[in-house]
């Protein structure tokens, strides 16, 4: 369906033309979402940044998300999961401290000394290279809203047919190029789905900022 992430981003940008002229900030999910987001930012003449999120996993079942964290100390919790898993304040603090250290390491690696772009009063366009379970994309939307975005748009090239149900009310608008019935994994819809490197992420951010 897509030759690579660049072509996917170009096709996705066409679906986002209705946002042109609004106060936008395009946010790519590292790493694979950034090449897609770069094409969107270029087409819409909008600034590009990364949105770095980390899932907070239940201590005894790390694959189960009890929340997520973003930069500037932002945290969103699923109170029901925390209660059902009987997670103590101490356990929650330990998980958050560990994930926050990794989040800051990644943010520094991608952005360097440049400041995070402010989202207050802006439309945050959260972009990834696709959605499978939707957990990371949903967390990113919640973080963007917590960071002050006036409106959150989640945009991806490909997702399963029921993907908007996975998002719930995390995004104000969901945009997708294709929702194929025979969906198993994001990578099956790319001819080239090679891993995006840190260097490619940094280069994309530099390019758009210039």
Image (cartoon, rainbow, N blue to C red):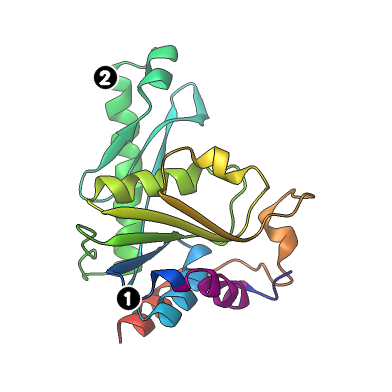
Position of the C terminus by quadrant:
bottom left
- Residue that numbered label 2 is attached to: 89
Q: Which residues are magenta?
A: 5-17
> Would residue 192 appear left or right of 165 to someone viewing this image?
right
Please tell me whether residue 13 belongs to the stretch shown in magenta: yes
The answer to which quarter of the image holds residue 12 is: bottom right
Q: Residue at x 42, y 47 (%)?
A: 171
Q: Residues within 10 Å of mark 2 (few under 14, many from 20)?
A: few
The answer to which quarter of the image holds residue 120 is: bottom left
Vertical arrangement, residue 105 with respect to residue 113, above or below = above
The answer to which quarter of the image holds residue 26 is: bottom left
Residue 102 percent across, percent down from the top left: 35, 48
Front residue of 148/31: it is 148
Vertical arrangement, residue 2 with respect to residue 60, above or below = below
Q: Which mark is first along the chain, 1 or 2?
A: 1
Residue 98 percent across, percent down from the top left: 33, 38
Vertical arrangement, residue 19 with respect to residue 63, above or below = below
SS type, badge 1 = loop
Q: Nearer the viewer, mark 2 or mark 1?
A: 1
- Residue that numbered label 1 is attached to: 21
Please tell me whether residue 181 belongs to the stretch shown in magenta: no
Position of the N terminus by quadrant:
bottom right
Question: Outermost residue, front direction?
Answer: 18
Front residue of 203/42: it is 42
Between the C-alphas of marks 2 and 1, the distance is 44 Å
Front residue of 172/204: it is 172
């Amino acid at each position: 369906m897509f030759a690579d992430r660049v072509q996917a981003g170009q096709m996705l940008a066409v679906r986002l033309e209705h946002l042109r002229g609004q106060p936008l900030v395009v946010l790519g999910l590292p790493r694979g979402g950034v090449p897609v987001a770069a094409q969107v930012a270029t087409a819409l003449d909008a600034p590009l940044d990364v949105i770095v999120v980390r899932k907070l996993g239940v201590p005894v079942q790390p694959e189960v998300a009890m929340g997520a964290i973003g930069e500037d100390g932002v945290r969103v919790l699923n109170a029901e999961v925390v209660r059902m898993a009987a997670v103590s304040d101490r356990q929650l603090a330990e998980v958050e401290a560990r994930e926050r250290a990794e989040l800051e390491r990644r943010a520094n690696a991608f952005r360097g000394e440049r400041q995070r772009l402010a989202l207050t009063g802006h439309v945050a366009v959260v972009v990834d290279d696709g959605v499978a379970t939707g957990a990371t994309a949903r967390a990113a939307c919640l973080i963007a809203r917590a960071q002050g975005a006036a409106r959150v748009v989640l945009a991806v090239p490909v997702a399963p047919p029921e993907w908007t149900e996975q998002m719930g009310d995390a995004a104000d608008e969901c945009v997708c190029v294709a929702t194929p019935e025979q969906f198993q994994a994001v990578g099956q819809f790319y001819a080239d789905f090679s891993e995006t490197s840190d260097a490619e992420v940094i280069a994309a951010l530099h390019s758009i900022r210039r």
